Image: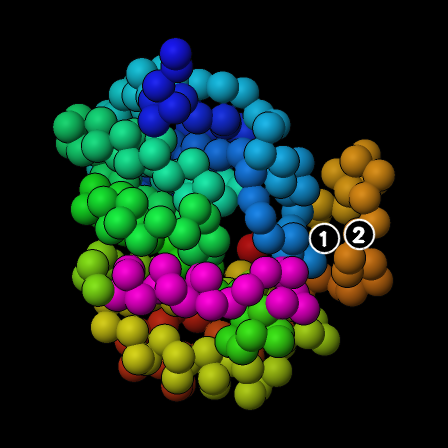
Amino acid sequence: MANISNIARVHSIETMGLVDGPGIRTVIFLQGCQLRCRYCHNPDTWGLKGGKEMTAEELIKIVKRYKVYYKNKGGVTLSGGEPLLQPQFVLEFFKRCKEEGIHTVLDTAGHGCGDEKLYREILQYTDLVLYDIKALDEKGYFKLTGGRQRESLDFLDILIESGVSMWIRHVVIPGINDTKDNIIQLAKFINKIPNVEKCELLPYHNYGIKKYKELKIKYPLEGIPPMDEEGFIYLNNLLAKHLDIPHKVPSKVI
């Protein structure tokens, strides 16, 4: 019988990632997500039965090929989909990474198996969490994702208790959450979290429309333009003004 803790369903692998954590990273995108974020550009990651089955050994071999590039805290990032839907594998794989001296990052919205004990175990082998804040209230969270905010906040409580460093991420969408009030409230929320190192505002883009068409899924934000540069820089300056931690304002939309 297969050991489920040693097998993952993998959507794709990026071997020289530069945006999902510090340094140069191997980013492993795991399959499966319970949320249906209106701005999601990878609907092909949703299905839990999609992707390719790969063992921890196979992935460790790939990761080790690029170990020479993991300087300045480079390493491995598990993303998705939602990696916490495959928590036994995340735990096993991160343990193996730490045995190899490889920096580990977990990219998550906190919507996974709901097993608090398992979450705590995973965080023991996690160097950094990229925590995705979808919305700041239950109503807005459900409208944007179709999921419950409470589940994400429960994970955040465990993350705060663990003391593991985190970067906050928040996607900004024109006409939905690109308001002055939303950014100020976001800053106030972040200021209450002791282990936050930085916050990244991510500009909405519509790169995923083609995938929706290929999968014959209606695109939820049809007609909403990508985030404009002037507005994005303004919101970053506003965030920097209200955050208690330093915030680097980008010079353009990436």
Tell me which amino acid carries mark 1: Asn
Between marks 1 and 2, how big is the CA–CA gap?
Answer: 9 Å
Instruction: Please state the horizontal and vertical placement of residue 137, each as a whole percent of the image.
Output: 54, 77
Check disc 1 and report the residue beneath it: 206
Q: Is residue 214 above or below residue 208?
A: above
Residue 16: tell me if it is visible.
Answer: no
Give the label, 1 or 2, closer to the camera. Answer: 2
- Residue 163 bears which disc, if any? none
Are the residues at dot 1 and dot 2 in contact (C-beta closer than 8 Å)? Answer: yes
At a point 62% along the width and 40% down the height, the residue shown is 46
- Tag 1's secondary structure? loop
At 21% from the left and 32% from the top, the residue drawn is 95
- Mark 1 or mark 2, earlier in chain: 1
- Would you say 39 lies left or right of 89 here? right
Q: Secondary structure at mark 2?
A: loop
Total marks placed: 2
Q: Which residue sits at x=19%, y=46%? A: 124
Estimate the x, y position of residue 18 in percent, counting from the top left: 41, 42
Q: Quadrant of the N terminus?
A: top left
Which residue corresponds to mark 2?
Answer: 219
Residue count near mark 1 (Cα–Cα under 10 Å), binned few <14, some 14–19, many ≥20: some
Q: Position of residue 126 (x, y in %)?
A: 25, 45
For the point 40% across and 58% down, the residue is: 131
Considering only vertical position in the picture, is 205 above or below 136?
A: above
- The amino acid beneath tag 2 is Tyr
Q: Which residues are magenta?
A: 142-160
